[in-house]
Amino acid sequence: MEFKVRAYRFNPETDEKPYYKEYTVEDYPGMTVLNALIKIKSELDGTLSFRRSCRSAICGSCAMKINGITKLACKTQVSLEIDKFGIINVEPLANMPVIRDLIVDQEVFFDKIKAIKPYLLGQREDDAHNRFKTLKEGEKISQPVYDKSEFKNLTGNEDTPNCILCECCYSECGGVVGNKDYLGPAALAKLYRYAEDPRDNDKNGSRLVNGSMPNGFWDCVHCQACEQFCPKGISPVKSIVRLHEKSIKNSITFSPGSKHVVSIARSIGETGRLDEIKVAFESGGVTGLLNDLPVAFGAGLKGKIPPLRLKLIKDMEDIRLAYKELDLEDKL
Amino acid sequence: MITYAYYPGCVAQESGKELDNATKFIAGRLGINLIPMPEASCCGGGVIDGFDKNLKLFINGRTLALAEKEGLDIMTICNTCTLTLSEVNEELINNPESLEKTNEYLAKIGLKYTGKVKVKHILYAVRDDIGFDKLKEKAVKSLKGIKIAPFYGCHILRPSSAVKFDDVENPQGFEELIKALGGEPVSYARRTKCCGFQTILVNESTSTSLAGNAIYEAQEKNADAMVTPCPLCHLSLDTYQTVAAKNINKKLSLPILHVPQLIGIALGADYAEMGFSRHNVSLRGLMAKVRQNDI
């Protein structure tokens, strides 16, 4: 069966602006989008540029937009795309500048990975660590860290250490679309991985404090795209939410994002409902309120104002009991 | 007549009251019996697990158990409520440890959950349980000649491990609804992207640039209106539209409808019945077009 590949083309040295070029390719059973691109490059047009290496969904090089969604070309079957879209439309990853055709400049992405300090901080000086210093040649190394639950949580098949840095999540991230300085899902999932590692010697909680700064984990828009489109089944957004939880449990609540979450939890604990006015005030403080005043005033003129005092839900004591059972009352 | 436990969520009972009213209007016309849930709490606004993941399980497990006690499925009208209740439902169905822990709490308040409840958003409840053919029968106004941009947002589609109504890569439920009502769905790239609401009180610039660019793209495709299945998206797209326009430095003026309002105008509801006076961007122009389209 013949099918069409419509490829984004742009060579900044010769092209004024990007354009699309169509190729007709002959299908074979099991053909991947990467197979199709390699066939185009070797048989039809040697100038088409794209990254590729392992062809086994492990190196992450061939990530690109395929019919509008970021995927690994080597993991994407041509037949399934043709069934759904009738064409293979390939474009470079989003949220990064294009170098040529389907190749993007990854520098910003890797700068953000470096920014979260993707290595163990300091050196532990506890007994378990000191034992390593006295090991004799050939002696079996026993690392008690592997038995700790935090570490076990990080070693599942779909967990953050399996990230291949392919940038699929970064390309789909709504937070980065809205704010190019936002660290993005891959870096923040890695931050969580180190924040949870019991070998990490982050004595003063610097990971959580730095991650709570502007452009950090409170700027996640919760669009769920990183989880949905990760080719390795990792959920960066769930790691980000765990960072939120860990920060609040450690009383690192100086950011508007943490105030927002605590305020919602407080509102539910008090009324069973989300108190829109109170949450707006508690999240942004006086500055936030002044900033939102024109919007609130405009909405008020239209009668779109939430009630100033909310009626409690029926059986409110059930909700209070949930907070009590989970020892959350002092966190409000 | 089909009966649901009705979970409107908080915003539709507060600043987005017009959505609750429009839902009740179309439920009456389409023969949907909505049983109120006065005991149900807020779902946690999509962020409560950032406070405590077990609290998310407990309060939403309670809501699911309340519906199960009545033998009813839940109908939602908000994307984020839909996702939160669906995620908790999946967790309780698939993780015996979570179910046991949640049921220990529920037992203390006289409830139990066994995983029988389905959570349905009104968009897909109308498609699957009422049917677009019945909707066509009941319609008295056509949306013929009106270009409508469907804005799915995030939580009605993603993650597809929890919300399973549509094809996450190429959803069509919204387009099918618009066509069934005689309208013309506008195709645009940002239809499944984020409105930015979750950071509107945290990072307004990020939030409004996402909403603003989606509106701008739909406007550039000559949309007469945009429709959203979520009152949170509606706040971003309509209430904050003026701020979004300023942020992205573009002229924006696109009316934003809730799903039940779109259905409502096809069923003959007037301006007041749909609460259009509560919108930031006027719908008078759109309604003038609809008024000429008697079936």
Image (cartoon, coloured by chain):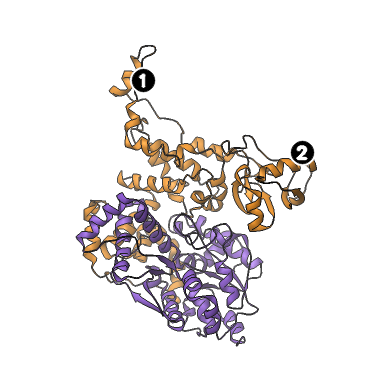
As drawn, the label of residue A42 is 2
Chain in orange?
A: A
Chain in purple?
A: B
Q: Amino acid at mark 1?
A: Ile
Task: Give the quarter of the image for residue B139.
Answer: bottom right
Q: Position of residue A4 (x, y in %)?
A: 74, 53
- Secondary structure of the residue carrying tag 2 is helix
Q: Residue at x 40, y 63 (%)?
A: B81
Q: Position of residue B46 (x, y in %)?
A: 40, 58
As drawn, the label of residue A269 is none
Evaluate whether residue A7 shows in this view.
Answer: yes
Q: Amino acid at mark 2?
A: Ser
Which one is nearer the viewer's eye here, B182 or A140? A140
Task: Give the quarter of the image for residue A286.
Answer: bottom left
How many marks the image carries: the answer is: 2
Chain identifier of the residue bearing label 1 in the image: A
Label 1, on which residue?
A141
Check if mark 1 and mark 2 are on a common chain: yes
Q: Residue at x 45, y 31 (%)?
A: A119
Relative to B272, residue B176 above or below? above
Q: Residue at x 45, y 49 (%)?
A: A237
Chain identifier of the residue bearing label 2 in the image: A
Q: Is residue A178 left or right of residue A93?
A: left
